[in-house]
Image: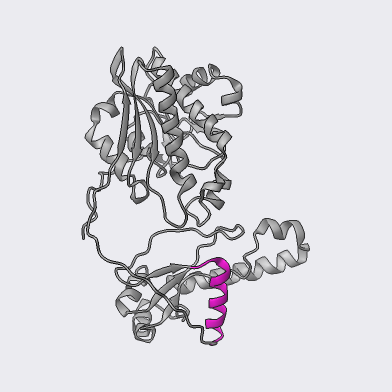
Amino acid sequence: MLAPDVADSAAFESWLPRARGKFVLLSFAEPSCRPDENWDRLARPESITRFRAARDSARRAWSGRTQRLGRSAMRALDRAGVAGILTSLWSAGWGVTKIFAAHTESVPVLDLSCEDYGLVFRLAERNQGPRLRLDARSAPLGERPMFNVIGELKGSEKPDEFVVLSAHLDSWDGASGATDNGTGTITMLEAMRLLSVAYPKPKRTIIVGHWGGEELGLLGSRSFATDHPDVVNGLQAAFNQDNGTWRIEYIRMMGLTGAGAHFGRWISAIPPEIAGGISLDIPGEPERGGSDHMAFLCSGAPAFRLQSNYPDYRQYTWHTNRDTFDKLIQDDLKNNATLAAMLAYQAAEDPARVPRDRRVLTGQDGQPAPWPACSPPERSYSR
C-alpha cells in the first residue's frame, strides 16, 4: 500500500487499521534512477525541461502527502501492526542509496534500491497486487558496552599540552563502512605508527582517539572530552579525518582567528608533494554538527577536520550501500597518513600555543549568533 493521501494526522489515524498486515511505502518513487548529470550530457534540452518539471511537481505533491501524516508516521504504522515499512533514499548516483536509522520498535523498515522501490511503488499504485516475502529474525540483546580505543605518545617537554589525532570506529551497515570511517581509522593508525618510529618523544603529548558511537551522536568523543577536561584545556590542536578516500584538500579554521598563521607555518614546512593543493579557509566558521572534532571545538579548543573531496563522498559512499573496500585509493591513504603525522609533528614542536580567539558569528537574520554548544554525552540508550 502507498502512504495514504489524507487531509491530516487525524484522518491518518482513521486509515491505519486498513494497513494492518500490509507493507506500506513511505518514500517518493523517483521517476528515473538515471543521474541528472547523465540527462544533462545525453538528453535533448526539451526532454530535460519536461522531465524535471514533472518530477518536481510529483515530489512536491508526495512531500505534502507525507507531511500531512504527522511527524510520528513511522511509529503510528508500527503500533498499527503493519507487515513492514518500505523506503528508498536515493543518492542521485547510479545504484546508490543512503542508509539511516529506523524509528520503529518491532516493525521492520526496509530500504530498497531506487529501481526496486520504483517497481513495487508502480505496481501498488496501479492496484496490481505486488506481494513481498520477508524473512527477518532478531533478538533483543539489551545494552552492550561501547569503547573508545586510545593511544598515546607522552610529551617530553610539555606533557600537559596535547595534539589529538581523531577518527571514529563505527559505521552504518548498508555496506562495510570503508570510507566512513575505515579510512579515517587506518589513516590515524598509520600516522601514529610513523610518529612512534620517527618522533617517539614529542615535545607535547600526542593522543590518537578512535571513537565509538560517532554515528549515534559523537558519543565516544563527547564522553572523552567530558571525562578529560585536562586534554580539552591543554589542547594544542586536534586533527579529525572522517570523509572518504581522496587526498586531503581542504582545512577550515573553524572560526578561530589565530589558527591560520599556525597552519600556514605548518603546511609550508611539509613537502608540496604531500601537502600541495590544500586550501585553508581562514578564519572560516565553526560547523554546527559534523564529526568528532566538534566534541572539542564546542569548548573553543582548536579542533579541525582534514577534509577530502566532499561532493563525491557525499553522493557515492557516505552512508550508502556502496561504501566498500574497493573504493579506497591506497596512494591517497598513504599520503593522508603522512600528512596527519607531519601536522602532528609541527603542532607538537610549535613553540607557541594555537590561540582560541573566536570570530564574531552572525546568523541569517544578521544578528549575532552563538558559538556551537557542547552537548552532554549520552551514556546509555536504555529505554
Q: Which SS does the magenta portion mostly show?
A: helix
- Closest to the observer: 279 or 178? 178
Point out residue 29 in the picture as x, y percentages from the top left corner.
55, 71
- Closest to the observer: 251 or 373? 251
Q: Quadrant of residue 140?
A: bottom left
Residue 95 visible? The answer is yes
The correct choice, above or below, for 44 with respect to 254 in the image is below
Furthest residue in direction right, as rendered = 44
Residue 304 visible? The answer is no
Tally the numbered discs: 0
Model colouring: one colour
Image point (32%, 74%), residue name: 78
Point out residue 337 in the picture as x, y percentages from the top left corner.
49, 30
Q: Is residue 119 magenta?
A: yes
Image point (53%, 35%), residue name: 333
State left or right for residue 335 relative to residue 144: right
Q: Quadrant of the C terminus?
A: bottom left
Point out residue 363 in the picture as x, y percentages from the top left corner.
43, 43
Q: In which quarter of the image is residue 18?
A: bottom left
- Closest to the observer: 82 or 49? 82
Image point (52%, 82%), residue name: 124
Q: Quadrant of residue 249?
A: top right
The correct choice, above or below, for 57 with respect to 313 in the image is below
Point out residue 238 in the picture as x, y percentages from the top left corner.
39, 29
Q: What residue span does the magenta drawing correspond to?
A: 112-127
State left or right for residue 62 relative to residue 154: right
Image point (31%, 17%), residue name: 155
State left or right for residue 96 relative to residue 362: right
Q: Is residue 158 magenta?
A: no
